[in-house]
Amino acid sequence: MPNGIIIIDKPADWTSMDVCAKIRGILHEKRVGHGGTLDPMATGVLPVFVGQATRAVEFAENSRKEYVAGLRLGQVTDTQDISGETLELRPVTATRADVEAALLHFMGDIQQIPPMYSAIKINGQKLYDLARKGKEVERKPRAIHIYELELVERFSETDYLLRCVCSKGTYIRTLCHDIGQRLGCGGTLYSLRRTMAAGYTLADAVTIEDVQAQGEALLKPAETMFMEFPAYHLPSAGREKRVRNGNPVTDETIADGTYRVYGRDGTFLCLSRAEHGVLTSIKNFFGA
């Protein structure tokens, strides 16, 4: 059975679930999930998890991500991107220096109000379902973190290219909207490409056509998501049996921290946390 991670360069006009459905059909494996939704208009890095590797999805979703985004000043839309209906067109007097100064206000820990056109549920209803009915409800601000935010290029008095590294839960279109509001002219997202997610970049990405041609050969082992952590190889059959049964093992020589744990034959077994000489599994990646 296929197990592993495929990094897809998502094409425009596909949903993230469209990609998963396609991979499910190509590889004939029901267990397929993705590590962080991309809107249909967006392209770029979409980690797709297959088989037992779906156990790593939660780590991908919680990881930081990098985007290259097109910001258009002077336009406000109901979806906060150019796929929506234009609500306002305003004159733009902001200079490049003004935009760069505005970006500084969105660095670090900030609060962001999720857009109405999103899959967030309030009282059991998805916001975009309410938005399509013309309804708007109050949304609580959510804490996010912007690690890096820079102006890459200015194309015209209205169009800019930004690069953003951010935490889970960040809406780039909302960021563009809010930058426009701060500048007093409004703003919307006109293009979006994710360049990094879960530690994978565009250099790791393949197309749907590549998967159709090469299939399972493109699967990366689940452990590649955790290469930032050191490897720990279990030294005995007894300790390996304990780990495989979900039990902690002791090793007074091991430093505190997170480890990739391997069996004696080199099989990646789990991601574990060591504290005070006790190694406890965080997530297992073996078995049915």
Image: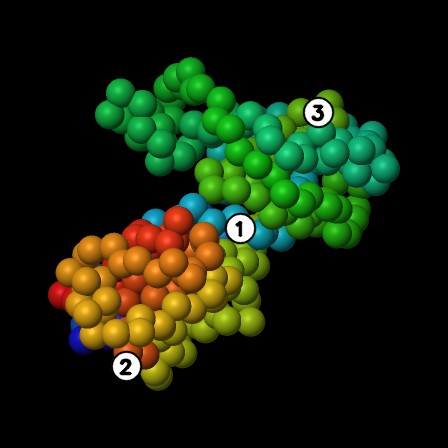
> In front: 51, or 173?
51
Residue 197: % across, % down: 49, 56
- For the N terminus, the image quarter is bottom left
**Element type at mark 3:** helix
| Left or right side of 154 for 248 | left
- Give the residue type that dot 3 points to: Arg
Q: Which residue is mark 3?
A: 182
Residue 214's tag is none
- The numbered mark at residue 65 is 1
Tell me which residue sits at (19%, 56%) in the image.
246
| Residue in the image at 54% along x and 58% along y | 196
Mark 1 or 3: the one toward you: 1
Q: Which residue is mark 2?
A: 265
Residue 243 visible, this orientation: yes
The crowding category of the residue bearing disc 3, from other C-alpha atoms within 10 Å (few below 14, some 14 to 19, many at least 20), is some
Q: Nearer the viewer, residue 143 or 140?
A: 143
